[in-house]
Image (cartoon, rainbow, N blue to C red):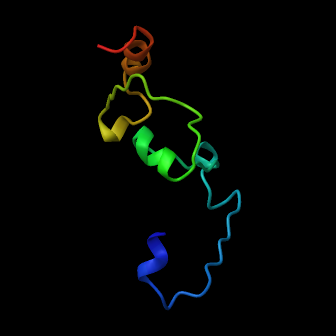
Amino acid sequence: MALQKYHWVEKINHVHTGGNSSGIVDGAALVLIGSEAAGKSQGLTPRARIVATATSGAEPTIMLTGPPRPPARCSTGPG
């Protein structure tokens, strides 16, 4: 979708190896977020429902050490 504005790009050659790909980001995913009405209008069936969200952060120089508060916040329920 993002490449639609680059109409002159005909092909993308992805080359991923153990040397240029991080082991912690080797998956892929797609999430469509929208209203129930939008999903129905496109003939889509929901597979999940977002019931709670939370965020957290850490100093970028010591990343991956952020506080584990968001999962705890979500497990106690929304609100």
The answer to whether residue 32 shows anywhere in this view is no
Indicate the position of residue 5 as horizontal and vertical percent values: 41, 81
Indicate the position of residue 79 as horizontal and vertical percent values: 28, 13
Residue at image x 55%, y 50%?
Answer: 30
Indicate the position of residue 62 as horizontal and vertical percent values: 37, 35
Single out the residue that lies furthest toward the right.
17
Residue toward you, 47 or 65: 47
Query: How many labels, in total?
Result: 0
Residue at image x 61%, y 50%?
Answer: 28
Indicate the position of residue 50 as horizontal and vertical percent values: 44, 28
In which image quadrant can residue 70 be found?
A: top left
The answer to whether residue 68 shows anywhere in this view is yes
Image vertical order of residue 32 relative to residue 11, above or below: above
In which image quadrant can residue 37 be found?
A: top left
Q: Is residue 60 left or right of residue 74?
A: left
Image vertical order of residue 49 relative to residue 25, above or below: above
Residue toward you, 10 or 40: 40
Single out the residue that lies furthest toward the bottom.
8
In which image quadrant can residue 71 be found?
A: top left
